[in-house]
Amino acid sequence: MRRLAVFVAIVGVLAPARAPAHFILVSPASWMSQDSVGLPEKLGPCGDEGGGTPTGTVTAFHPGDTIAVTIDEVIMHPGHYRVALAVHDRSELPPEPTVTPKAGDPCGSAAIENPPRFPILADDVLPHTQPFAGPQTFMVTLPTNVTCTRCTLQVIEFMSLHFAPCFYHHCADISIENVPVTPPPAGGASTTSTTTTPPTCPSPRCSLDAVVQGPACASDDIPAPIRRKLERAPALLDQAVTSPPAKAKRLRMKARALLTRAGGAALRATHRKPPRLSAPCAAAIDATAAALADQL
């Protein structure tokens, strides 16, 4: 009995913690409903173990778009993320990467494709060994030579310090279509385009207005604290243009902090009960605010 107790104690020390990692696909909208810890997500390719309800949501993009992908890792394990695209059928999605076990860790490391090759769009995204402070957004560029009316964007999480299987899975149904434009009639008279294209914005204020007033946030009533940050940041940048260098630097730093806080507040607003922002709107605000902050 004493020898058995010692053996059990040793196994307990060597075995990785059993706490599962979970993540929620915030944006693009998931093809399946997700509970508070992201289930269903255990079976590939898209979290197919059952327990959710199909959302029917198809998010529209254009060839070559750089899109924002937002995840919320609600239970942490060291690891990273991979993004892949299936154009016609989910059977086109690549298999899970090869896993190399390490002593005491069945999920020691996973093969990473660098550079990624289609159908993989990005690999080794958000590598981490510590918990994130909140939802994370990263950018992925869609192929310029692919179109589809309903294809699958897959996001998988690799987890080390975990019992096999070593991956969780979410998918979004998306479309990738060229923007149709109605040609002008004979005689050169202008006509209305069938699709409104986003404006080319020369200023931060224009970029933020385009998001707040654009299709992603069309059905949202943006909370006043977030709206004030989005309005105050470009006002500070406008003031910086005519200020002495030292003051201009301080104003840009304040604007950057406001943009960062606005993006974080937008993502957190999706998790309120009831949510105060839709996931597509929050992701669009966060991605635009982050892009502007990186320029300051």
Image (cartoon, rainbow, N blue to C red):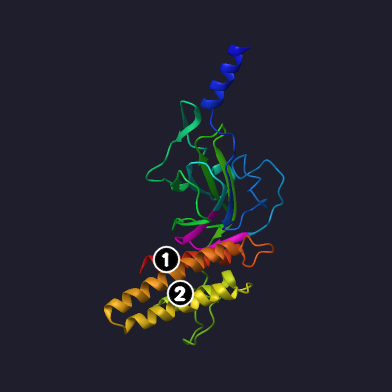
**Residue 8, relative to residue 107: is it above or below?**
above
Residue at x-position 53% and y-position 31%: 16
Q: Nearer the viewer, residue 91 or 3?
A: 3
The residue tagged 1 is 291
User: Left or right: 22 with respect to 248?
Assistant: right
List x then y, in percent, for residue 262.
51, 69
Looking at the image, can residue 123 be seen? no
Instruction: Report if the CB atoms under discs 2 and 1 are less than 8 Å apart.
Output: yes
Query: Residue 227 shows which numbered tag?
Result: none
Q: Nearer the viewer, residue 247 or 30?
A: 247
Q: Amino acid at mark 2?
A: Ser
Please say whether residue 70 is one of the residues in the magenta stretch. Answer: yes
Residues packed near mark 1 inside 10 Å, few (<14), some (14 to 19) or many (20 plus): some
List x then y, in percent, for residue 287.
48, 64
Looking at the image, can residue 105 be seen? yes
**Residue 43, relative to residue 2: is it above or below?**
below
The residue tagged 2 is 207
Residue 212: quadrant of the picture: bottom right
Residue at x-position 54% and y-position 27%: 15
Q: Secondary structure at mark 2?
A: helix
Mark toward the start of the polypeptide (2 vs 1): 2
List x then y, in percent, for residue 180.
52, 70
Residue at x-position 72% and y-position 51%: 53
**Magenta-colored segment: predominant secondary structure:** strand
Q: Amino acid at mark 1?
A: Ala
User: Left or right: 11 with respect to 100?
Assistant: right
Quote the CA–CA distance across marks 2 and 1.
Answer: 10 Å
Q: Secondary structure at mark 1?
A: helix
